[in-house]
Image (spheres, rainbow, N blue to C red):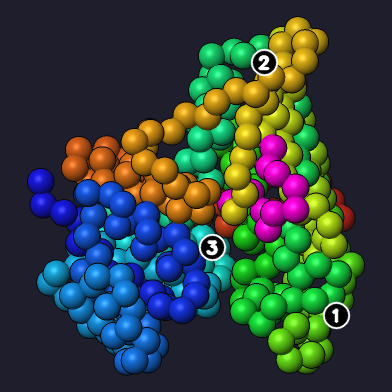
Amino acid sequence: MDSIRVGIIGASPDRGWAARAHVPALRALEDFRITAVGTSRTESAQRAARLFGATHAFTDPRRLAEDPEVDLVVITVKVPAHAELIRLALAAGKHVYCEWPLALTTAEAESLTELAEDAGVRHVVGLQTRYAPAIARARRLLAEGFVGNVVSATVYSARHLGAGTQIPDWAAYTLDQTNGAGIVEVVGGHTLDAVAHLIGDFTDLSARLAIRHPHAVIEETGVAIDVTTPNHLLLDAVTAEGVVVSAHIHDSKVTNGRTRIEISGTAGDLAIVSGANGPGGISLSELRLLGSRGGGEWQPLPGEDPLTDMTFGTEVGNVARLYAALAQDIRTGTTTVPTFDDGVHLHRLLDDVRSSADTATRVATS
């Protein structure tokens, strides 16, 4: 069958998520072919095209979206630009894959979802942690009753980025609340989406947000900046099945950035754990699955990987698995990947977290 032709907006040849994850994932999958790349400067766009094997290089995202040799537009730029670029792709009638967070606000995300539905194209949001092999195996084991009836979930996720008060220049924008890419949106969004994917949606919650590091210094320049995004998210939630959930998600940890999600049931337990001293954050960490039944010792359980004939690192692998599922959806007419609707649902959940924290009250989820 013909390859799905991809145009990537934000395909910097020097650094960035596209070069780290999307490009190697797409180049490894026979269903896709990178035909166009776009950056803000002519020189970098042309260099990216040569490096990534694309036929076309653009600095105008509209021209990339309208190129007849592009079927799928992939958006990997900073969050404030997402909405405009999604609209351009939808106006051109192209499928769209946008990285998470989908938009700056829930209202913006809702508007984009309506446009995508009206356009009749495939729309995907980058919640790729769902495709981590440990998450996939845990979800199946939970459905099969490995832990019996799920009773509780305990979540801890700490990120090493910006340890103490030092932050690399490329990440400084994440500390500005107006950019919509802080710990709540990125680490909180990916982590809570993975938890809900495993045990079901929350029905009500109580949350606290805190800025424990109000100032930071950019490592390369020594410039001091104010921090307006929370460093800590504390959550107490309940699912429709009565599962109680506690979570502590935080940033700027000096040592041992890591994640652990422990799910306890009437017959056993599962734990999804990352290695210590990595970058931290569930979406960037290699995850392992452990299981225990009837009070026995924890035992490692192999994950489930549909791409068993390929070898990937964590970042590339999860994105590649999402792309493989998207290709199958496009070929067969199914919808299995996380869509803009899922993005809206997660945006609403994070709004509920903020509302609870702002009012110091327990809230029903939207």
Assign a secondary structure to mark 1: strand
**Whole-percent x, y for residue 332 in the image:** 20, 38
Q: Which residue is mark 3?
A: 101
Q: Residue at x 34, y 49 (%)?
A: 323
Q: Nearer the viewer, residue 25 or 309?
A: 309
Kindly give the residue lying farthest to the right in the view shown: 212
Residue shown at the point (75%, 47%) measured from the top left: 276
In this view, 152 is above or below 219: above
Q: Is residue 282 magenta?
A: yes
To which quarter of the image does residue 149 belong?
top right
Q: Main secondary structure of the magenta part?
A: loop
Residue underneath mark 2:
147
Callout 3–callout 1 Cβ contact below 8 Å: no
Q: Residue at x 73, y 39 (%)?
A: 260
Residue type, label 1:
His
Is residue 270 one of those drawn in magenta? no
Q: CA distance from mark 3 to mark 2?
A: 32 Å
What crowding class fits label 1: few (fewer than 14 Cα within 10 Å), some (14-19), or many (20 or more)? Answer: some
**Quadrant in which residue 43 is drawn:** bottom left
- Give 25 or 344, whichever is nearer the viewer: 25
Per the rendered image, the range of residues in magenta is 273-283
Residue 203: % across, % down: 67, 37
- Going from N to C along the chain, the mark reached first, 2 or 1, is 2
Q: Which residue is mark 1?
A: 215
